[in-house]
Image (spheres, rainbow, N blue to C red):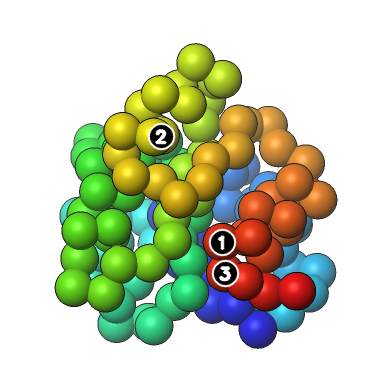
Amino acid sequence: MSRVLVVTDDSWVRNEVHAALSIGANELIDHDDPATAAATATDESVEAAIVDLQVASMGGMAVTRSIRDGEHPIPVIILLDREADTFLAGRSGATAWITKPFTASALRSTVADVTGAA
C-alpha cells in the first residue's frame, strides 16, 4: 500500500485523483494548505505527494520545492495545466509530472513508478 499526500484546493482535481487511485492499495491523504504540505508529508510518513500546479497562493512549484528540500524528501508528482509547464516541473525538482486532464491509468502508473509499487 502506498500512502500518498494529495495537495490541492480544487475539488475536481481531488475527485479525479481519488477516482484514479482508489482502485488498488493506496491510502490518500488530502491537504489543501500549501504552507504546511511539507510538514504533513513528513508527519504522515507518505511515500509520495501529488501536487497541483495551481494550489492556493503558494503555487505547486513552491510546494514541490518545500517537500523535496525537506528533512525527509519524498517523490513529488506535479499536476500540470498544459504541456508547456514541463519546464516548470523540472525546475521545481518534481520527480514526475502529468498534464491535466489525465487518465486514471496514467496517474496510477506514475504513482507506481515513483513509489516502486507493483
Q: Position of residue 68 (x, y in %)?
A: 28, 58
Q: Position of residue 86 (x, y in %)?
A: 47, 26
Q: Is residue 18 left or right of 42 when viewed as pictured?
A: right
Mark 1: which secondary structure? helix
How packed mark 1 is, by other alpha carbons closer than 10 Å (few <14, some 14-19, many 20 or more), is some
Q: Position of residue 44 (x, y in %)?
A: 37, 82
Q: Which residue is mark 1?
A: 114
Disc 3 versus disc 2: distance between alpha carbons?
18 Å
Residue at 80% in and 69% down: 23
> In the rendered structure, which disc, 2 or 1, sits on the residue that comes first in sequence?
2
How packed mark 3 is, by other alpha carbons closer than 10 Å (few <14, some 14-19, many 20 or more), is many
- CB atoms at circles 2 and 1 under 8 Å apart? no
Q: Is residue 36 left or right of 10 when viewed as pictured?
A: left
Question: Which numbered tag is attached to residue 89?
Answer: 2
Looking at the picture, which amino acid does disc 3 mark? Thr
Q: Which residue is mark 3?
A: 115
How packed mark 2 is, by other alpha carbons closer than 10 Å (few <14, some 14-19, many 20 or more), is many
- CB atoms at circles 1 and 3 under 8 Å apart? yes
Q: Is residue 56 left or right of 31 when viewed as pictured?
A: left
Mark 3: which secondary structure? helix
Q: In this picture, is 36 found above or below 16?
A: below
Looking at the picture, which amino acid does disc 2 mark? Ala
